Amino acid sequence: MPDLAALRRMSAPALHSLAAELRTVLVDRVSATGGHLGPNLGAVELTIALHRVFRSPDDVLLFDTGHQAYVHKLLTGRRFDDLRQAGGTSGYPSRTESPHDVIENSHASTALSYADGLAKSFAVTGAHDRRVVAVVGDGALTGGMAWEALNNLGAAPARPVVVVLNDNGRSYAPTVGGLAEHLAALRAGATRTNVFTALGFAYTGPVDGHDVVAVESALHEAAALGRPVVVHCVTEKGKGHPPAEADEADRMHAVSPASSTAGASWTSVFADSIVAIGEDRPDVVCLTAAMALPTGLGKFARRFPARTFDVGIAEQHAVTSAAGLAMGGLHPVVAIYATFLSRAFDQVLMDVALHRLGVTFVLDRAGVTGPDGASHHGMWDASVLPVVPGLRLAAPRDPATLRELLRAAVSVSDAPTVLRYPKAKAGPDIPAVRRTDGYDVLLDAPEAPVLLVAVGPLAGACLAAADELSRHDVPVTVVDPQWTMPLHPGLLRLAAGFPLVLAVEDTTATGALGARLAQALAAAGERTCVATFALPNGFLPHASRDEILRAHGLDGNGIACTVLKRLARMKAVV
C-alpha cells in the first residue's frame, strides 16, 4: 500500500488500480480471518478520497460503527494477515494501533457526538487548523443519538464539522423508517426538501461514492465552507465482489473464516425455538434493532411478518416500544446483542420493570464474544441487570434448556425476563442427574467439600473440572441454577451445606452470581466460603472465545486449578 503522501500524488488511473487492489486484499484477508466484508467493500473510494483531502491524524477522521474502517486501517499501515486474531490487528479502530484511530467504536450513532465535542475543544484551545470529519452510514442515522448530535451541530454555524453520509441504503438489512424514504427521495432527486438543511447544515450531493474524483471535489467544497456540512455519498455495500453484491440478505456484511466448523449455534437454536413459540402463542411478537438475521429472528420474520418489528439501530426505542406492546396485551421478545442492551438500561429499568411489564429480552453474544473485541463482549449484562427490581435472568447450559427457559420466560406477564447465551456452537445437551427445587444437579458427589455452581454454557467446563479434580481425590458436586436472578432459596440452602462454593460465570466478577450468593449467605449467618470465578473488571482484547476463557482460567483445567488453590488456602488457614 502507498503511504499517505504517495497516495495524495497518485493519478486518477492509479487510484482506480489502487481501489481494485484494496478490494482484492479485503476479500482475500477477511475471507481467511473472518470479519466485516460488505461494509468495507462499499467504502473503498470514499476512504481514498478522505485521505487525499484531509491530513490525518492532524485532521480527525471518525468512523461511526467502526467496521467500515478497514480501508482506513490499510491506508494507514496496518497489516491484515492477523486481522481479529489474538495479538493482531483489531477489526475496529484501535487507539493503541495508530494515531490515525481516534475513537474505538463499534456501537452505532456515536461519531457525530464525538465530532461535536472535538470541534468544540479545537475552538476552545485555538486549534483552528484542525478539521473534524465524521463518516456515518444511513443505517446509523436511525439511532436517536445521531439526531441529538445533528441537532447541536446544525445550530452551531461556526463549528465546521464535515459529516460524510455513506448512504448504501443498509445497516445489516435495508435501512428502515421515514429517514430511509427521505434519503431515497434525495438520491432520486425527487424532493426539494432536505432534513439536513432544515437543521442548519449545508448540504452537497448526492455524490457517486465510488468516484474518487467526485468525492474529492465534494470534500474540498465542504471543507472550504467553514461550517457544518453534510456530504451525501451514495455507495453500494459489497461493491466489486459479485457474491456480496448478489447477497440480498446483508451483502456479506460479516463473514466467518473459511475453516469455521459446522454445528448448531445458540442463535440457530433460538431461531427455531421462537418460531415454535410463535405458532403456539399468537400474542408473542418480536423486535430487533436492525439485526433480525444476526439475532436469529429471520425465520420468525418470514413466518410472522406482521408480528416482527425492525426499529432500526434504536435500542432505547426498541425497549420502550416493547413496553407499549406489552401494555397493549402482547408479549414482546426483544432480540439484541448483550453489549447493545447496555444502551437501553434506563428503558429496561424505568419503562419496563417499573411498570411490571412482561417483556422478554434475548441476549445474543453474551459473555465473551471473541474476535470482535472489547466493545462487543457481553460482559456486563449479567452483573448489571440483577439490580433491576423484579427482573428474572436465565442462562441456558444447552439447547434443551434454552428451549425450556425461553418458554418459561415468555410465560411471565408481570416482570421483565432475560435469556442470555454466547456466540458459539451450542454443543450437545447436558442431562441433569436430577432436578430439585431451584437447580439442576449435573454431578452429585457424596461428601463433596466443593460445590461448583455452573452458570449457562460453562456447565461443560465445570464438569470437565470435576473430572480433573477427581484425579486429585477431590469430589465435587456440580449444579446449574438456570435462573441466576432472583436467587432461589433452594440454591441458598444447598450452598450453605458446603465448605467451599465456587460460582463460575461468563460475566464480570463485580455483581456476578457468586457475589450475590456470598452476600445472601453472609446475611443469613452462614459460614460457607463462596468465591466468584468470572471475568476481570476490564476491557478484554480480541481473540477467540476459547482463547479468552482459557486465558482467564474459565476452562476445565483452569477451574480445577482454582479449586485446588482455594482448598489449599482454606487448609492453611485452619
Image (cartoon, rainbow, N blue to C red):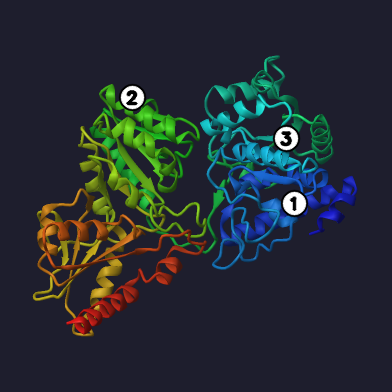
**Residue 236 can be seen, yes or no:** no
**Dividing the image into 4 quarters, which one contains the C terminus?**
bottom left
SS type, badge 2: helix
Q: Which residue is mark 1?
A: 57
- What amino acid is found at the position of numbered circle 1 in the picture? Pro
Q: Which residue is mark 2?
A: 324
Task: Name the residue at 68% across, 63% down.
Answer: 79
Question: Mark 1 and mark 2: span between their CA atoms?
Answer: 46 Å
Question: Mark 3 and mark 2: span between their CA atoms?
Answer: 37 Å
Query: Looking at the picture, how far across and down is residue 432, in whole percent?
Result: 16, 61
In the drawing, does residue 194 fall left or right of residue 334?
right
Q: Please report contact status of discs 3 and 1: CB closer than 8 Å, yes or no.
A: no
Can you tell which of label 1 and label 2 is closer to the viewer?
Answer: 1
Query: Looking at the picture, how far across and down is residue 545, in whole percent?
Result: 44, 63
Dividing the picture into quadrants, the one containing residue 292 is top left
Can you tell which of label 3 and label 2 is closer to the viewer?
Answer: 3
**Residue 419 can be seen, yes or no:** yes
Work out whether residue 240 or residue 109 is closer to the camera in this orientation and state it: 109
Question: Mark 3 and mark 1: span between their CA atoms?
Answer: 15 Å
**Dividing the image into 4 quarters, which one contains the N terminus?**
bottom right
Query: Looking at the picture, how far across and down is residue 465, in whole percent?
Result: 27, 74
Dividing the picture into quadrants, the one containing residue 192 is top right
Numbered circle sitting on residue 124? none
Q: Which residue is mark 3?
A: 162
Q: Earlier in the sequence, mark 3 or mark 2?
A: 3
Work out whether residue 552 or residue 302 is closer to the camera in this orientation and state it: 552
Q: Residues within 10 Å of mark 2 (few under 14, many from 20)?
A: some
